[in-house]
Amino acid sequence: MKHPDAVSNLAARLKRAHVLDSVLELLDWDEQVNLPPDSGGRRAEQTALLAGLAHEAATDPQIGELLAALEVSAELLDDDGRVLLREARRDYDKATRLPTDFVTEKAALDSEAFLVWQSARAAADFQRFAPYLERQLAMARREAAYAGMQARPYDYFLDHYNPGMGEGTITALFAELRSGVVPLVQAIVASPVVPRDDLLKGFPVAAQQALLREVTAALGFDFRRGRIDVAAHPFCSGDAADTRLTTRFKPEAPLSALFSAIHESGHGMYEQGLPLEHLGTPLGTHAGMAVHESQSRLWENQVGRGRAFWRHFEPRLRALFPEGLAGVSTAELYLAINAVRPGVIRVEADEVTYNLHILLRFALEQQLFAGDLAVRDLPAAWNAASAEMLGLTPGHAGEGVLQDVHWSRGKFGYFPSYCLGNMIAAQLWETVRTAMPDLEDDFARGDFTRLLSWLRNHVHVHGRRHDTPALVRRATGHELSAAPLLRYLRERYAALYLSDGG
Ligand code: ZN
């Protein structure tokens, strides 16, 4: 077979597998948004059948044959062909190296461990969950071993979520971040400036819905091939052709739905910016979870919590919620939007203290995989790390070691993505502001197109062409570093909380 034919054959098979995956995602979206309460059994049948078909399509022996044929003379391929071959090989090996009985056992453990975790968290009973965490860790070691990474299982998972990132690099980045964030948080906590987010109340949900639709459309989320619905947990699923976002409304935190919608729109606009003609192949796939998170964080924090953004949207907010905002000054509103307050719960954390939650989890995962920490000692280690990093000890395991879903699903090595995403967002932000010093004047007019096209051209268009460090280097001209995030946090928060402004 000629090279061009083999490349297009390979792309066609990858796209077929991706269509099946996309149907699975749509079923999952529907389950979280629409599914009637007694229809779960039928959905489980539908999902199980589709999952089997999707796995068959992804491990199709013909993909293996096409890869092997192309690898014989890979030097004849053009740049796109080489990326396709390299990344398709990575995915194919991952999917085919795991024995079927391992995959079945893992799927069963994931759903069982998830249910046990839910009840253990509700009862604040770590002992109930501990045996399942032990089993997930053992499964993780087995999975790494199948990939030939038995000596460095944690690195296997770190690289799985963020290609090119390893334990050594992340340890150094996080140490740099910690040395800057800890004193900043201490200074903010000691500041006499206290945010009054409790002043914001009485925001009717219908008006909130109208606002978040208006804001996300202005930012650039394309509602012709995407939508936003309500679910128990905010998420983004789907792809460039059909992007599904969810948000939730919290009466006690009226801006929470807006910010989670902006966050998910950032994920969604990344998906929508991936090259549609390559949908379903690595050239049309995102570059990893940290890069994905950088897009959501940049829109949520650098843009959505900035003064220029609110110069445009504050009048809209006041027009929609005249009663809720009566008596709240512009300065009070802006401070409430940028409230910093250490807490024990990660998903409720502000953008400054959030990083400490991730450093804590990364350190504990490292110790678990290194064999320096036993599962039974994890709650005590968690509480000690929480006291050290956040100055707070959780009242019980439900708001401590059991608070996150990730470990119940065996998703080790995922947490660093959030913090790396913050770093990448800040580094991109610094680069784009240097390139366009008047960019925020656009925001004050409600115009976000220049920022979105910059992200399209420097991040989205590349798909998975580059690994995480290479993509950051290309987009910003520098190695990934914690310094831009520290500069950004100091600039924004010192101005708000510290009287000397720095
Ligand atoms: Zn996110």
Image (cartoon, rainbow, N blue to C red):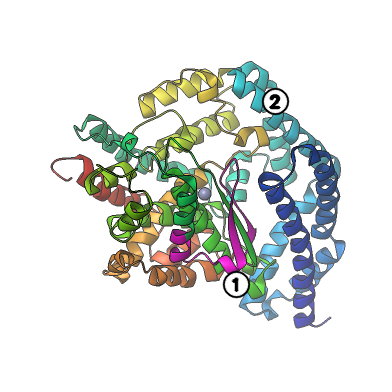
Q: In this view, does 108 lie to the left or right of 406?
A: right
Visible residue check, residue 5 = yes
55 or 179: nearer the viewer: 55
| Residue that label 2 marks | 116
Q: Answer above or below: position of 502 versus 86.
A: above
- Going from N to C along the chain, the mark reached first, 2 or 1, is 2
Q: In which quarter of the image is residue 406?
A: top right
The boundaries of the magenta stretch are: 214-240
Tag 1: amino acid: Pro
Quadrant of the image containing the N terminus: bottom right
Visible residue check, residue 169 = no
| Residue that label 1 marks | 275
**At numbered mark 1, what does the secondary structure look like: helix, strand or loop?**
loop
Q: Answer above or below: position of 327 versus 19.
A: above
Q: In this view, does 149 lie to the left or right of 61?
A: left
Residue 398, given in percent of the width and then of the height, sits at: 55, 23
242 or 191: nearer the viewer: 242
Tag 2: amino acid: Val
Find the distance from the CA under tag 2 to the CA under tag 1: 40 Å
Q: How many marks?
A: 2
Residue 253, given in percent of the width and then of the height, sits at: 42, 38
Mark 2 closeness class: few <14, some 14–19, many ≥20 residues within 10 Å: some
Mark 1 closeness class: few <14, some 14–19, many ≥20 residues within 10 Å: many
